[in-house]
Image: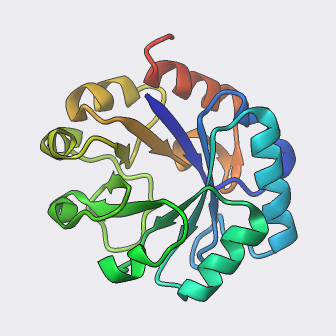
Amino acid sequence: MIVKVCGFTSAENTMRCGRHIDWVGINFWPGSKRFVKDVSLAKEVAAAAKESGVKEVVGLFVNQPLSWIQEISSEVGLSLVQLHGGESKSFASNVELPVVQAVVVQQANEYFGDYLLVDAPQENHGGAGLAWQWSKAESVSRMHPRVLLAGGLTSENVSVAVSQSRAWGVDVASGVEESPGIKSESKVAAFAAAAKGIA
């Protein structure tokens, strides 16, 4: 079970929380409350994640230029790129790093990334923390081996969500936060333990 926590905005917070999780997400979309505008800060967050033992550092982008995604990925030291907009298959194929494609469950048959993140049906680009019928992702998990489940997850419901969806991994942001971009270490630890079934 892969546990991804997205939307870190502080290197110190990342260092404390990173030891409990597998993947760290950094948000590069200006429309997000967790947007990291400063590249030097993003580099500090990525470095802190790696130092804490995190396996992958993921950059989240929404309909942004490929050249800019490549530049940020290289400069920050990302290991995965998460596409959270309406990017095409040809666009994704030109991304130099492995791609996490974020979709709502109804779009899962259009999957073309190396990993698939299935989120709650919504009009924005994720991060709303909306719970949904996670069982709808079970058929997706049977089709695709590396499905990450997102949407309204907390330490109290993640084990049920995993059981219903049969997901390979989980992704959380608001469900473990003290405030947008700042995570609660105790919530992160509890979430990871529940997701991995070791609580």
At x 84%, y 64%, the residue is: 41
Asked if one can make out residue 171 in the rendered structure from this viewpoint, the answer is yes
Q: Position of residue 53 (x, y in %)?
A: 73, 33
Residue 22 position in % (x across, y down): 59, 35
Q: Is residue 84 above or below residue 43?
A: below
Q: Is residue 59 above or below residue 48?
A: below
Image quadrant assignment for residue 103: bottom left
* Residue at the top extreme of this rendering: 198
Q: Is residue 5 left or right of residue 82?
A: right
Specify whether residue 88 is in view.
no
- At 55% across and 89% down in the image, what residue appears? 65
Display coloring: rainbow
**Residue at coordinates 47% horizontally, 44% vertically from top-left?**
171
Instruction: Tell me where residue 20 appears, x and y as whole percent.
Output: 66, 27
**Residue drawn at (31%, 77%), measured in percent from left and top?**
89
> Residue 123, located in which quarter of the rendered image?
bottom left
Vertical arrangement, residue 198 with respect to residue 81, above or below: above
Question: Vertically, is 34 above or below 2?
Answer: below
Q: What is the tally of numbered marks visible in this picture?
A: 0
User: In which quadrant will I find the N terminus?
Assistant: top left
Residue in the foreground of this view, choosing between 29 and 177: 29
Give how far across and how far down residue 40 sits, in percent: 87, 69
In this rendering, would 1 be left or right of 25?
A: left
